[in-house]
Amino acid sequence: MKTVLKNMLVLASILGSSCLADNPFIQTFYTADPAPVVHDGVCYVYTSHDEDVTENGFFTMRDWLCYSSTDMVNWTDLGTVASLHDFKWAGQGWGGGFDNGAWAPQAIERDGKWYLYCPLQGRGIGVLVADSPAGPFKDPIGKPLIGGDHIDPSVFIDDDGQAYLYWGNPKCWYAKLNKDMISIDTGIGDKGLVSLDMTVEEFGKRTKEDERRATTYEEGPWLYKRKGLYYLFFAGGPIAEHIGYSSSKSPTGSWEYGAVVMTPRSAFTIHPGVVDFKGKTYLFYHDADLPGGGGFKRSVCVDEMEFRPDGSVKPVEPTKEGPKQVGHLDPYVQVEAETICWTGGAETEPCEEGGMNICDLDDGDYIKVKGVDFGSGASMFGARVASSSSGGKIELRLGGVDGKLIGTCSIPRTGGEQKWENTSCEVKGASGVHDLYLKFVGDGELFNVNWWKFKKK
Ligand code: FUB
C-alpha cells in the first residue's frame, strides 16, 4: 500500500525538488519532536509521528518511532517502539483515547534499562521501561507518572546520579526522579512537582501579548549540561515557534535568559533536542519541509551546534545538507536495508526475520547511503530479498541515482513478501569512499529488501 507521503515524495522527485538533500533526515514517515540520546557510540533519536492523514485539522499522533545512527547522516529505522496502546489508562481524559495524543517523548538509559517518557495529551506523562532502546517497552506503574494536562517531558541524569524531569506548556515545571526512574521524589514542591517562576529575566520577554505567557517560553524544554553549566533549551513564542535557551549553574535554576538559537522554520511548532556525539554537539529540531508537509505533518532535522568561549550558544543556521558525516559506512558488514541517508520512494515495515525491511518499491525508487568506504575494492554484492511478484533488479550506482553503474543484481520471485532468499551479483569499479545508490528497477510492485552486504576483492 502506497502512503500519501510516498506519493508526495515520488511526485517531488519527478518535479525535481531538493530530493538529494540530507535534511529532513527521515523521509519514510512524517516525524516530529526529535529526542536524541547517545549510548555506546550510537546516537538514537526517538520521535513522535504525524499520521499521513490529519484528522479534525489538528495533531493526529498515535505512536512513537526510533532511529539510530553511528555517523549522523545514515539513519537506521528501528520501528515503532511504543504506542498509546502501551498505556492502559490512555482511554481516560479528553486527549483522544487510544486514537490520538502521542506527543513529544524522550528516552534515557540507566543501569541497562531504557526509560521512555511519553506525554499523552490531556491525560499526563507516562513512563515505559525496556531492556533495549528499541523495546519492547512496558508500562511499569499502570498510571500516569504525572497526571493532568502536562506535556513535553525532558529527562536528564546529572553527574551526581540525580535524575530530573522537566516539562510543560504554558509554564515550565520540574521534578526530581527517584533512582528507579519511575517515581517522583515528593520531598520538594507540591507533591514533588515544582512550577518555575516564569520571569522575563529567566526566559526573555515575549514580543506579542499572551495572557498565559509573559516570557518567550512556550513548551518543549530540553535540559543539557556542558562544562558545568546547565542549559534549558525550549520552544519559544509567539507562534511560529523559535528555539531559545536559558542557562544556570544549577539544574533547578534560577535561570538566566540567553538568546534565540534557531528562528522559526516551516512548521508553526519547533522542538529542540541537544546531544553530544563523537566530540561535537548537535541540535535536533523539526520543520515541515518534506513534500506534502505542514504544521501537522512535520519532519525531523539535525544540524551542528556551536558554543562561544564564554559558553553562550551560537545561533544555528538550518541546512539542507545536514551535519558532516562522522566516519564512513562499512559495506563489508551486514547493513540493514532500512539504513538510509535519503530515499526517493522506499518505505519501511516490520520484518518477520526481526527488525525492519524496506518495502513498497516501484520502478525508479532508490536509497542513498552516504560515505560508503569500499577501501581497495569490492567484488560482489549480496542482499536478502523477498518478492511475491516477478521480482526486478537492484542497480548499484555511485555518486548519484544515475551515477556510475558498478553492478546490477537480479531479484527473483521468492513466493511471498516475507519469504526471504539471498541473492548476489558481481560488482566492478567500486573503491574508495562514495555515496552509494541502490536503485530499484522493474515492472509493477517490485520486492522487499531486509539487508545487504558487499564482499572485498
Ligand atoms: O507534537 C505535538 C506537540 O507539538 C509537542 O508536544 C509540542 O512540543 C509541539 O511540537
Image: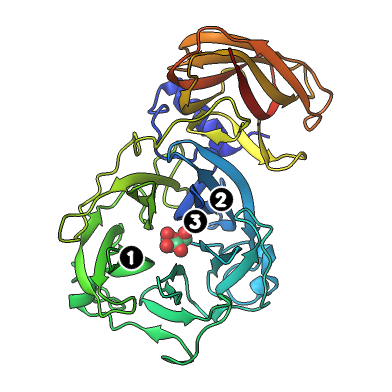
Disc number at residue 225?
Answer: 1
Q: Label 2, label 3: how many angstroms apart (C-alpha)?
A: 26 Å
Residue indicated by mark 2:
66
Left or right: 406 in relation to 248 = right
Given residues 190 and 241, the one toward you in this image is 190
Q: Position of residue 94 (x, y in %)?
A: 58, 74
Q: Quadrant of the N terminus?
A: top right
Q: Of helix, strand and loop, which one carries label 2? A: strand
Residue 388 % position (x, y) = 79, 24
Residue positioned 66% across, 78% down in the render: 141
Q: Which residue reaches farthest left?
A: 310
Q: Is residue 86 above or below residue 403?
A: below
Work out whether 152 lies above or below 25: below
Q: Amino acid at mark 2?
A: Cys
Q: CA distance from mark 3 to mark 1?
A: 38 Å
Left or right of residue 131: residue 43:
left
Label 3 packing within 10 angstroms: few (<14), some (14-19), many (20+): few
Quickly name the residue at label 3.
57
- Residue 121 position, x and y percent, is 53, 69
- Label 3 is placed on what type of residue? Gly
Q: Quadrant of residue 3?
A: top right
- Density class for disc 2 (Cα within 10 Å; few <14, some 14-19, many ≥20) is many
Residue 92 in view here? yes
Q: Quadrant of ligand 1?
A: bottom left
Amino acid at dot 1? Lys
Classify mark 1: residues with Cα within 10 Å, few (<14), some (14-19) or many (20+). Answer: many
N-term mark: 3 or 1 = 3
